[in-house]
Image (cartoon, grey):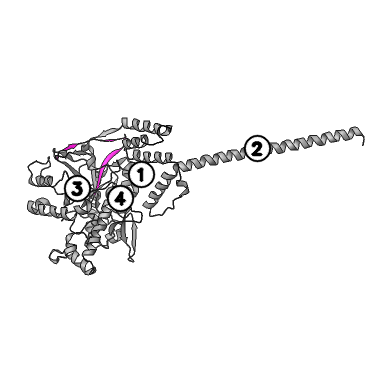
Amino acid sequence: MDSSTRRQRRKSDLRKKRRRTRRRQTLKRTLIVILIVAICCAAAFLVFITVRAVRNNREAEAEAALQGQVVELDEEALIGTPAEADLAEAERLADMYDYDAAIEYLQNSDYYDSTPEYQAKVDEYNEVKDNLVAWEPENVTHIFFHTLIVDPSKAWDDDEKSEGYNQYMVTIDEFSKIINTLYDEGYVMVSMHDMCEVSDDGKVTRKDIYLPEGKTPFVISQDDVSYYHYMGGDGFADKLVLDENGNVKCEYIEDDGSVSVGDYDLVPWIDTFVEAHPDFSYLGHKGTIALTGYEGVLGYRTDEVYRTQDESRFTSFQRQFFIDNPDFDEATWEQEVADATAVADAMKAEGWEFASHTWGHIYPLGVGLESFEEDTEKWIENVEPIVGPTDIIIFAFGADITSDWTEYPSDNEYFRFLKDEGFDIFCVVDSSQYYVQFNGESLRMGRRNIDGFRMYYNPGMLQDLFEVDDVWDKARPDEVAPIG
């Protein structure tokens, strides 16, 4: 092989080597670019999940609780910057329509001046405030329930109490569908104190409620949250308790005698729902719980008769209670009072209010003024120390202190007595969509009963809220007996 041929071959080999080198370099650069893009995408994703983690975990936990599930929180995902935590808290306040508090919270932050996101949120909240719609209190509806049925098969087992449960109660399944419908339609829970201003001298004046367009205020209440003796074993919760996290839940006695703790009645169910849907609550307000006192409150045997054990005052149910609980003594009673007070305090901290339902579940005009005064004193002595003072009375049976549907006359002797005892808000039962009156000294409000009777006989009266056919529990008996 001559020298010229060898040179040509060396040049060819060199060109091939250079091409292989360039291909390797190009491939290397491509892999580096892909790696950089992948790292950037991963970083962006981590930032996204960090910002969303607090709300997502909270909503997941709350929604799962509604289904009786348990969620393990991802503690690492909960790690975020203080600025992100501030924004989340401000958004929670704004979700509950407390725009002033949300604005103040951000403006008081050390990050406000240096964080454009804070300033943009404040501008956003101010714009929302400028476009709120005023709701007159006369256009606020009020609905109420009794204790929710957990197990329909036990409530409707054809004994002598089944008919009453069918008339006056709803199941948890029905309640869940009703509340979800109200939420989807833009309803928002408000307090009756949001509808009025009570001055130190006892004057009561009307007050508008301001909400974004598309939102509708309503009041919700529940009667007889005492878990009476007669309800035992009939598919209802046993009492309200605090769980290991200090949240209000219900105890429910299973068939084998074991105790389950969960959302087995209106209060804990609503608490869990609002945790997932804070925009269902106006300023963090929830419902009003109407309590009697003769068998205690919230499932605890707190009335004085359980302390004194005065047999002359026993009902047949109380007599049986002491037969079944021979060790119940004054120390036990004191613990019952302490436990009930702790639950009541936790409820108030979560936005619940309490009302008198009369101590003995009585009809004021039926028993006369003197007996009514004695009954009110029993409520103040036995129930108020546990739940605190209240200016709301929700009359038992929906009965009123007058037969007149016009404003309360100021000289009505029942009214004057209740005003002297500190009551300013008076509630009766009325099927009208709206029933609100002011007489200068009181707010008087009608409440619409949501129960088997109303759903069966007057479904049209509830169409502004929900369609009965959409919520009716097929576990109900085919017919609901008339009342009376």
User: To which residue does mark 3 refer?
Assistant: 390
Q: Reading the chain from its start, which is encountered first: label 2 or label 3? A: 2
Task: Tell me the mark number nearer the camera, choosing from 1 and 3.
Answer: 3
Query: Is residue 216 inside the magenta stretch?
Result: yes
Question: Could one spot residue 223 in this view of the protein?
Answer: no
Which three-letter amino acid code belongs to the residue tagged 4? Phe
Q: How far is disc 4 from disc 1 in space, using C-alphas?
A: 16 Å
Give the secondary structure at mark 4.
helix
**Range shown magenta:** 199-221
Q: Which residue is mark 1?
A: 277
In terms of depth relative to the viewer, which is nearer, 356 or 111? 111
- Percent position of residue 316, x then y: 17, 65
Q: Are circles 1 and 3 on residues that touch, CB within 8 Å?
A: no
Rounded to the nearest angstrom, the CA distance separating label 4 from label 2 is 60 Å
Label 3 element class: loop
Q: Quadrant of the C terminus?
A: bottom left
Q: Which residue is mark 2?
A: 30
